Amino acid sequence: MSEQATSADTDAPADGPLSLPPSPGSFLWAKRRRRLRRFAILTTVAVVAVAAVVFGPRLWADLRCGGLGSGVRELGGECVGVTDGSFVFQDQFTRIQEDIKAENDWAARQAAAEGLPLVRIALLTTLTTTEDSAMSADKIQSALEGAYVALHRANRTQELGDRLRYVQLVLANEGARQTHWEYTVGRLEDMVDDDVPLVAVMGQGVSSDNTVAAAERLSAAGIPMVTGVTTADGIDHDAIDGLIRTAPSNTDFAVALRRYLDARGDIASAVLVYDSTAQDRYTTTLRTAYEAELADYIAGSHQPFPGRSIQSGGPEVFDPITRNICAAETEAVLFAGREPDLKVFLEALSVRACLDRPLTVLFGVTGTDMQREREIAEWVDAGRLEVFYAAGADPGWATGATPAPEWFAAFHEDYTTLVDRDPHSLADGYAMTYHDALATAILAVRITNPWEVAAPLPVDVREHLLLLNSEQVVRGATGTLSFASNRGGNPGGKWVPVVPLPYPANPAELPDLDTYVTPAE
């Protein structure tokens, strides 16, 4: 490019406008604009900094728990709240939560395609674990698997009632020790008015004061409940309006054990060993049930121990008790305590002073992880022990070792197809109990105002809980279940087997006894 052309490009044309020098006012305005710009930038930085200090930890915590809008937030180091399955509470639950999320999505598509109502039911329990959590990860996984089977059966077959309403299952975590139940229950209360409304809650798994407090709040909100594995007497419809349960009560356990001892005939007396923690509703009401139903067998002085013995000395905690048991010369022990304490107790009994005399240990629990633990068998053998428990299900149902309830086979077929073909995966009993809890809640929803196109209100579903009887029974894995006011919302038709621990590999070694079935009325 030539110098002439460059000059022409850079100089103003001769006939163009005159270039006047800037006025003093324009300099002042430019200076003011620079100051305003700097002030705006500094203000923005300050606001961002303050927001980072005030909201940053909260935002970061929520991002760790699925992000804003996930329904889950971080409290006390745990992710608690409500999810449709998309947020996974623990890695162990990834596969089953993905299955639940997929079924929820399918139900939404089908409801839209068929013009049918879509409703939500929440599974409320502890969905995270710590060393001292109320439920183990294996039990939680079993619970989720059982609920998923019920959800799939209800949405895709007629086995759990007419498909007048499609159902989604949301998972509500109250924390490993139920510390954050208030936040989670608040979320559930808000979901009643959602486009896809919450119509029921199921699955509470711990017989604790927090469970009762949460149930009372849900009851006040008109939300019906079907608990999971809570067995404490007093956590039922008589005590809490709108609450029924599918697990046996502690009184049911005591009755089953009494019938077992009566049929056995070789045990004349038993010592009562109990957890002295007054706040534990499971252990306190189990002790009371023993005293009421097994009074003819209880002999000698009761033997209290502090709960959580594994944290306060291990087997040595039970040393004075094992000495007293040996001195009493009874044939059996009735144990009213939590599973971790029972393990420590069995270890202590395996080295007791009176190993020359065999001893039978009896307790009651919906289901237990201990069937899978080799050390239990070692302690039982070393201590010349027989251990039996009244339960909510029998591991032998899945293997064919013992007769099963009428509708167990239908559940088991779907379970093996959808979840796991290994019959031993059902050993803890939680999958069957949670299947029945969700099946019960779904049937209550479906018999509520079936002629109405809209989804039923929770308060209307609650009024139908105690109509699940006669012609409207629940085809459960653990029995043909019915619920009536004269049983306080406790299940009728529930099988309560007495199960050996460990479970024998040879069915011929099982006791030949009729299983106790709870009365329908």
Image: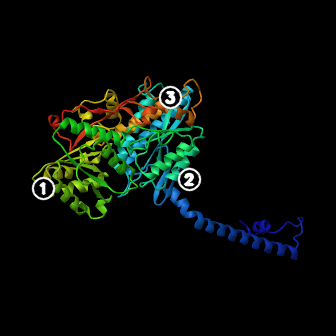
**Could you tell me which secondary element the residue under label 1 belongs to?**
loop
- Earlier residue among tags 3 and 2: 2
- Disc 2 to disc 1: CB gap under 8 Å: no
Tell which residue pokes out farthest to the bottom in this image: 24
Mark 1 highlights which residue? Answer: 354
Image depth: mark 2 or mark 1 in front = 1
**Residue 477 in sight:** no
**Residue at left 57%, top 38%?**
197
| Nearer to us in this view, 4 or 225 | 225
Mark 2 vs mark 1: which is more N-terminal?
2
**Residue at point 59%, 63% (across, down):** 55
| CA neighbours of label 3 inside 10 A, class few (<14), some (14 to 19), many (20+) | many
Which residue in the structure is indicated by mark 2?
A: 68
Find disc 3 in the rendering and name its residue.
446
Relative side of 403 to 212, left or right? left
Give the number of the mark in front: 1 or 3: 1
How many angstroms separate mark 1 from mark 3 (CA)? Answer: 58 Å
Label located before the other in sequence (1 or 3): 1
Which amino acid lies under the numbered mark 1 shown in the image of this protein? Cys
SS class, disc 3: helix
Q: Is residue 424 above or below residue 11?
A: above
